[in-house]
Image (cartoon, grey):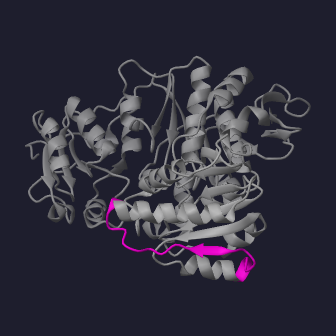
Amino acid sequence: MTQATSPVPAEDRSWPGLDVSGLRILVTGFGVSGYAIADQTMQRGAQVLVVDGKDSPEIRERANILEVLGVEFLLGAEHTRALPVGREVDLVVTSPGWRPDQPLLAEALAAGIPVWSEVELARRMQPADGPDWLAITGTNGKTTTVTMLESILLHAGLRAVACGNVGLPVIEAALDPEGFDVLALELSSFQLHWTEHLDCEASVVLNVSADHLDWHGGAEAYAAAKGRIFEGVRTACVYSVADPTTRHLVEEADVAEGARAVGLSLGAPGPSELGVIDGLLVDRAFVADRRTTAAELATLEDLAHLGAQGAGPHLVLDALAAAALARAHGVEPSAVRDGLRAYRMGGHRAEHLATVDGIDWVDDTKATNPAAAAASLSAAERVVWIAGGDAKGADLDELVAAVRDRLVGVVLLGRDDAPFTSALERHAPEVPVRRIDPGDTGDVAGRTRLMDDAVQAARSLAQAGDVVLLAPAAASIDQFRDYAERGDLFAAAVTRLPGERA
């Protein structure tokens, strides 16, 4: 990558429409976004070197495709501990999986080499007449909201796509040769940490609760990373009126002149808010007279298909957030209604699997932290809760105290059930608990047996009208390959249940 004359530094190059030709770019991490970064910048004349700690046949196979086109690779853990020796680097573009204290990244920053996220690079490279950005972050609900938003935008007749932490990499969407009208971006705190310029038309922070604190170094830094999504917003900063942290992030944001704060509420909205009145989702933010009028967007009945017992409060808030971003872009109320009616949840996100003998079975294996599980549990009146796994040191007391009146039984997975057992003993001692013997889960057969046992135990606790909910409030890695396998095995076990199906 060494060359005789250093190119114009990346930070000094004009943008939008950043020209990366001649830049010596180091891409750290060769996942989905790493591949897209290397591909898009190489095509435009950059000299690209990729480093990744893994050196597997799968990675080698993908690397071979780009090596033919001139991208260089250094694979193996030894190449992630420092900047490459004897190589000049003008810019590091990093995977969201790399922590800020990762030695190579720390060395780059100390040497004055800029470190950007894929999102930062995409924002700079996108041409001035490129798509508008509508962005979403939050501890929970990001994927549901961004896919709801995509559905609304498509029903408005716009060329739109969900991208970022879901769907296409942002850089591919931003530089798409056919050109999108608008991008619906899901952004994680990891992506936002390395992003300085977003300049979105509108953005939302759905909620902020304790998560990824080890990566960010604490709750304050985690919240600050979320708040970066508001920087440079031109039209609307959307927040939850019930979450003071999200309000504070809006108050602290450096936005474009004329940008407004827009609140979301499950109750009657005030001016510059969206909320719910008599079963209607209404908008008092993007109407001509916010003081005296409101626009009807949809009904709760339009969302009823999203839950076994109707859409839970968290899904209603997600729908309001998606609607607010769409309305900030000028979408008509009818398109909001049509997009929400047509929307279907993705796999493993409060997915209704079956009704057997009057009992609803719901897979929300993606609820891997207490806040996500609390939102899922709040959607039903009587729940048999399948929980447990690697709690990652999370405090479960607040969760159990909040949902105890809904619980008719608990089935515990996980090699260490102590965090759940102790919280249940303190706050819900009357609720029956079934502990599933971990056994040997080293192979698929063992994991299948484990989930079959959990489903049978839940069935013994439930009666007609109840919901059996897999919302573990914990990671899956102690017993399953990943959260998706946990959900897949749960769904398969439910299909084997005898009984009358509705």
The structure residue drawn at horizontal position 82% and vertical position 40%, both measured from the top left corner, is: 276
> The N terminus is located in which quarter?
top left
Residue 431: x and y in percent read: 72, 74
Front residue of 315/455: it is 455
The structure residue drawn at horizontal position 59% and vertical position 25%, both measured from the top left corner, is: 153
Does the magenta stretch mainly form a helix, a strand or a loop?
loop
In the picture provided, is 290 more to the left or to the right than 469?
right
In the picture provided, is 501 more to the left or to the right than 169?
right
In the picture provided, is 463 more to the left or to the right than 119?
right
Front residue of 402/420: it is 420
The answer to whether residue 135 shows anywhere in this view is yes
Q: Is residue 111 positioned above or below 273 on the image? A: below
Q: Does the magenta run of residues contain 268? A: no
> The C terminus is located in which quarter?
top right
Q: How many marks?
A: 0
Residue 127: x and y in percent read: 40, 26
Residue 208: x and y in percent read: 62, 59
The answer to whether residue 260 shows anywhere in this view is no
In the picture provided, is 10 more to the left or to the right than 309?
left
Q: Does the magenta run of residues contain 441? A: yes
Front residue of 151/330: it is 151
Image quadrant assignment for residue 370: bottom right
Residue 488: x and y in percent read: 45, 50
Q: Which residues are magenta?
A: 426-444
